[in-house]
Image (cartoon, rainbow, N blue to C red):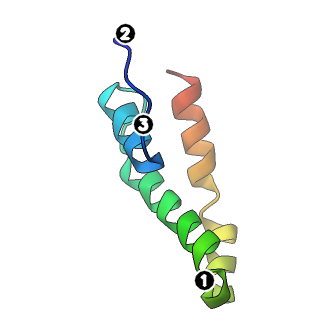
């Protein structure tokens, strides 16, 4: 496996992981990163209903991520 330089951003890390064959589709994870950034930087304008929906229905994305990187 070829060594890659450190990623400058989380989104770039996902792109590199996909290029290396570790992740199948980085787009789900990039959306997770964007959501995290929104929460960190715009926490005063978070819609609680949206946050609740994501925390209730989208946690399987984390499980998928763990399975993908664990199998690499």
As drawn, 13 above or below 36: above
Q: Residues within 10 Å of mark 3 (few under 14, many from 20)?
A: few
Q: Quadrant of residue 37?
A: bottom right
Q: Quadrant of residue 1?
A: top left
- Image point (68%, 68%), residue name: 55
Q: Residues within 10 Å of mark 1 (few under 14, many from 20)?
A: few
Quick one: label 3 or label 2, which is nearer the N terminus? Answer: 2
> Is the Cβ of the residue at disc 2 closer than 8 Å to that at disc 1?
no
Q: Which residue does the numbered mark 1 point to in the structure image?
A: 50
Q: Residues within 10 Å of mark 2 (few under 14, many from 20)?
A: few
Is 28 or 5 nearer to us in this picture?
5
Quick one: label 3 or label 1, which is nearer the N terminus? Answer: 3
Q: Which percent across, then down, holds residue 38?
A: 54, 73
Q: Secondary structure at mark 2?
A: loop
Q: Nearer the viewer, mark 2 or mark 1?
A: 2
As drawn, 41 above or below 72: below
- Image point (63%, 70%), residue name: 40
Q: Secondary structure at mark 3?
A: loop
Q: Which residue does the numbered mark 2 point to in the structure image?
A: 1
Q: Which percent across, then down, holds residue 21?
A: 35, 26
- Image point (54%, 29%), residue name: 69
Residue 7's disc number: 3
């Amino acid at each position: 496996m070829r060594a890659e330089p450190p990623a400058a951003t989380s989104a770039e890390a996902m792109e590199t992981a996909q290029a290396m064959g570790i992740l199948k589709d980085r787009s789900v994870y990039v959306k997770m990163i964007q959501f995290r950034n929104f929460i960190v930087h715009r926490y005063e304008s978070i819609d609680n209903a949206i946050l609740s929906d994501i925390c209730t229905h989208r946690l399987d994305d984390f499980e998928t991520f763990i399975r993908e990187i664990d199998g690499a």
